């Protein structure tokens, strides 16, 4: 499933990043890598998502979130 499909409060493990090298580099610089664990703090169906990864809050656009494959925990 994609990150964009998770609801607020759900936790997941990142499985893979789908996109070009610029996308992958940008996402990894934000702290989102394969095998990391995240929690969705905000996903109201419009606007960016707010997620928590390793104690940090990260704001990520919906288009980027749709390119991140996750496994719900």
Image: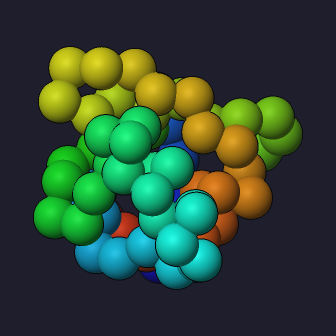
Give the image location of residue 15, x and y in percent.
Answer: 28, 75
Residue 33 sits in which quadrant? bottom left
**Residue nearest the viewer, comparing 39 with 63:** 63
Structure colour scheme: rainbow
Q: Residue 39 in the image: state x and y as whole percent.
A: 33, 39
Q: Position of residue 51 (x, y in %)?
A: 44, 33
The quadrant of the picture occupied by the C terminus is bottom left
Q: Position of residue 50 (x, y in %)?
A: 54, 29
Relative to the observer, which residue lies in front, 56 or 11? 56
Q: Is residue 52 above or below residue 37?
A: above
Residue sitting nearer the eye, 35 or 22: 22
Relative to residue 60, is residue 48 drawn left or right?
Answer: right
Whether residue 10 is visible to the viewer of this picture, yes or no, is: no
Camera sees residue 25: yes
User: What's the residue at 60%, 39% (across, down)?
Assistant: 60
Q: State the residue lying farthest toward the right.
A: 46
Please tell me which residue is depicted at 57% across the width and 29% down the height of the picture: 59
The residue located at (46%, 28%) in the rendering is 58
Q: Residue at x 58, y 63 (%)?
A: 22
Vertical order, 67 against 43 (above or below): below
Q: How many marks?
A: 0
Left or right: 54 as drawn, with respect to 14: left
């Amino acid at each position: 499933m994609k990150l964009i499909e998770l609801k607020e409060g759900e936790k997941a493990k990142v499985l893979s990043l789908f996109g070009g090298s610029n996308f992958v580099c940008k996402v990894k610089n934000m702290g989102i890598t394969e095998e990391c664990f995240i929690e969705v703090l905000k996903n109201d169906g419009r606007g960016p998502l707010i997620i928590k990864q390793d104690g940090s809050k990260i704001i990520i656009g919906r288009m980027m979130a749709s390119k991140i494959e996750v496994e719900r925990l």
